[in-house]
Amino acid sequence: MHTLHLYNSFSKKKETFQPIHPPYVNMYVCGPTVYGPAHLGHARSAITFDILFRHLQHSKYQVKYIRNITDVGHLENETEEDKIAQAAKKYSQEPMALAQHFTNSYRKDMQDLNILPPTIEPQASGHITEQIAIVQNIIKKGYGYVKNGSVYFDLQKYHQNFHYGTLSGRILEDLWEATRSLNHQKEKKNAHDFALWKKASEKHIMRWPSPWSEGYPGWHLECTAMSKKYFGSHFDIHGGGMDLLFPHHECEIAQAMCTEQQNPAKYWIHHNMITVKKQKMGKSLQNFITIQDLLQQHTLHPMAIRMFILQAHYRNPLNFSLPALQAAQKAYYKLYNGYQYLQANQVTTPTYNSNSYTQTLKKKIKNIEEKCTYAINDDLNTPKVIACLFDLLKIIHDLQKRMIDWQSLDQDTRICLYNTYTHFFKKILGLYEEEYKEKNTQYMMSILLPCYIEAKKNNNYDLIDHIRKALQKQNIRLKDLKNTVDWHYVMLNDKI
Amino acid sequence: MHTLHLYNSFSKKKETFQPIHPPYVNMYVCGPTVYGPAHLGHARSAITFDILFRHLQHSKYQVKYIRNITDVGHLENETEEDKIAQAAKKYSQEPMALAQHFTNSYRKDMQDLNILPPTIEPQASGHITEQIAIVQNIIKKGYGYVKNGSVYFDLQKYHQNFHYGTLSGRILEDLWEATRSLNHQKEKKNAHDFALWKKASEKHIMRWPSPWSEGYPGWHLECTAMSKKYFGSHFDIHGGGMDLLFPHHECEIAQAMCTEQQNPAKYWIHHNMITVKKQKMGKSLQNFITIQDLLQQHTLHPMAIRMFILQAHYRNPLNFSLPALQAAQKAYYKLYNGYQYLQANQVTTPTYNSNSYTQTLKKKIKNIEEKCTYAINDDLNTPKVIACLFDLLKIIHDLQKRMIDWQSLDQDTRICLYNTYTHFFKKILGLYEEEYKEKNTQYMMSILLPCYIEAKKNNNYDLIDHIRKALQKQNIRLKDLKNTVDWHYVMLNDKI
């Protein structure tokens, strides 16, 4: 596939990606509700759309990428209490201080995971005016009703004129059937009507004036308001986790249909969940592991998390296990070593040597390049891209084993090998640790290697051991070659 | 001074700091207008209030610290055009994408400079509802008038009932006298009336509905709205640069007086400016140097910037020069080496040796500790604190010179030396590079030193030179001692 194809959850088909107004692409992704530290599930969402963002940018699109911060209005299913307000109570914190704290820690996590910052990162609480305007519009169109200062979306009315369930395929009648009326829902005409505006109780700190009451907006409203504000009523991509497909995105569609007469997004993209013993990893289930715990307690390399997530296709469930993450780290180190080899050898002059071996290699490399492009365009098939990188790595190893200088390949092939590897490893998959840390390691190794060679020359085994052991702590292993010493990352057994 | 004293710009006196509701302290500081990269002037503001934030926290106060992000409403003096909108036009960017970009880069700068994140970092555009409510209130009280969809604050009316100029000492009548009426101000009754709400022109992207027009709030309004929202109508500290004293803070006081009948802040704290050839460094004057330019092009250590700023008292002007910053880096390295010495030696067992030398030292150290505490409590006299740290450093050097183990001091004195140095150097002045980088350097040195010793033993001068030269690049110098090798930071001449 020479152009991008994406699975559209709306049409339930893989479609050729054609932006509404090329070369511009507008992409909206549901960000975190900032009431606790981010876990592996958040990482999957952010990484999935980071890949799409990177690939679109490298496909010469001008991408405006919005990922919001939900700091108000996300209600607990059971109690219908605002999640931020609830957590604030628990920590005896002011809601906005708590939201700021977890927004900061989320940003730190994103930075650690090498996730590009979105173009705009708007907060729900920063768009109250816009949300109120939409509620007013919904009421005006006849799809919202006011009850005791709160406003609800009238699903029955909506369903008469539109169709509720176009995205999720859920059947409203069945939903009604299955639901018993809950106490706290007594204001609603029907159990599945959802809040557009909630009147705040007296103790509720997060509150804003509105035509109906001092209160706060309903959760589904914020994405409708913010995407409309920055993109208008129709945009290219709406992304999120499969857990948001219903009811969150279904409700967004309802809100947009009755006010703007159209499905807000052309492509609906949903990633699958991280699971733990077949259950979704999530804060509500208390079965989550935070990103910082993985990095600090389990001393995982941040790129191990990226690798773990990218080794699965984004639409497949991915089961969490520490050994799997450690294996991903091993895989990352292997690919990194290949990258480092190409980096170190890219500048030397070509001495092309055409023979049957290099001719075959040439074809192989070109072929893998095509496969990589095909895979990423094929609904972001990152596991396939990674497999291709390992195929390239095999070629590198083979060159090393046969003691063949890769310079003996012709220039085109060398450039193709180098560019394909670098482009997919670093730029698309983003499997590259922060520049600063990387430079630091290379700097340190540039001082250390001559010391190590000297120690060897003098048969100073104590010093040799000292250097080797110290480097092991950073997963670096030295390799004695004929005239020199090489270094690379390994996953040492004592760390697994 | 055993308790904090702060110079209050409102009373024009140094006052004992007594919070309104101890142990809680509410501090509001005017943050950046995010339409360009942050420069040294922004660093001074952030560092000044970072010191106050740190010192208050270490004085056992529970501090809620708000530093806002101005992403709308800050108008150019001349054209009365919104600064963000203007910059967005220049870069052909959407205003909110531009604001996000420079908010992100500001946060990166703050992180580099080791500035603690504020408790809440609210955005002006996120508080439109609150700002509209205040405008409504001002109109209701009779101090605002509507003209062509814009709302202005009626200074003449205000001045009749209150007094305009209580903070700045400016006399309104003189201001009127001096001002010629400008064309774009023709909607105003008087030239110094300021905008509370501006009607947006047709092309203006940043706009919100209001009772008066689709438009945007005036600059002075945001701080009144956000401080009131998170602190209520009276709070402890309001901070900012002296350039904000008039008219920004004066207008904030006017807005609060006529709606809440009180001066919003108990203590008004203003830091002085960074100057370049006696002119204020600022974006409008185009005479600024960005923080990232200092760090990257001029390869300054981030802590050199902190040191440079803290070597002057915050209420004195500070003239920018590169040599002064480089000298500050030298000073930082000296203090850092002292810190490192204490860190390295803190754990060894005491072998107290009481003699007249140690007795005198004991008194000296206790005395310096008191001076440090006095200095920081004396309106944050950081140059004095730094001088004290150098006095402690002199003691450390003297111990080293006399080959006296500092363990020969009695435990109390040692603890006092260690704690005073650490507390002020690291915790209060925050002169401590990011943990990660620090650990990395120490780790590298732990591998390298034995290699260096080996090279010396073998008289391998090439290797000795190689190691020394490589370390020089990081401003690290090795020092050959009798039985071992020591390392410390130096400012090398070839870098100045």
Image: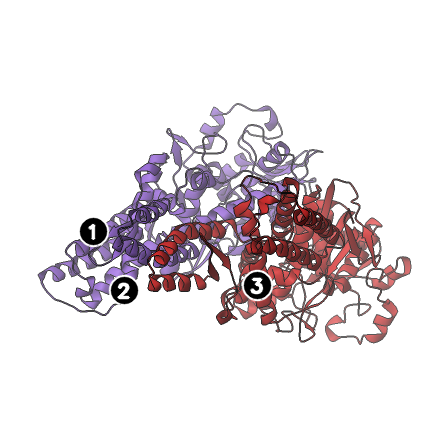
Chain colours: A red, B purple
Secondary structure type for disc 3? helix
- Of the residues under marks 2 and 1, which one precedes in the sequence? 2
Residue A250 in the image, given as x and y percentages of width and height: 79, 60
- Secondary-structure class at tag 2: loop
- CA–CA distance in space, label 1 to label 3: 48 Å
Vertical order, B281 against A338 (above or below): above
Question: Which residue is disc 1 drawn over?
Answer: B394
Q: Are marks 2 and 1 in contact (CB under 8 Å)?
A: no
Residue at mark 2 to residue at mark 1: CA–CA distance = 18 Å
Chain letter for the residue marked with disc 2 in the picture: B
- Relative horizontal placement of residue A228, taking residue B301 as reference (left or right): right
Q: Disc 2 or disc 1, which is closer to the eye? A: 2
Q: Residue at x 20, y 62 (%)?
A: B406
Indicate the position of residue B391 as horizontal and vertical percent values: 22, 51
Distance between the Cα atoms at labels 2 and 3?
A: 37 Å
Residue B366 pos. (x, y %): 20, 59
Residue under label 2: B346
Question: Do discs 2 and 1 belong to a common subunit?
Answer: yes
Task: Find residue A329 and name its label.
Answer: 3
Callouts 2 and 3 in the same chain: no
Name the residue located 39 percent from the left edge and 45 percent from the top edge: B301
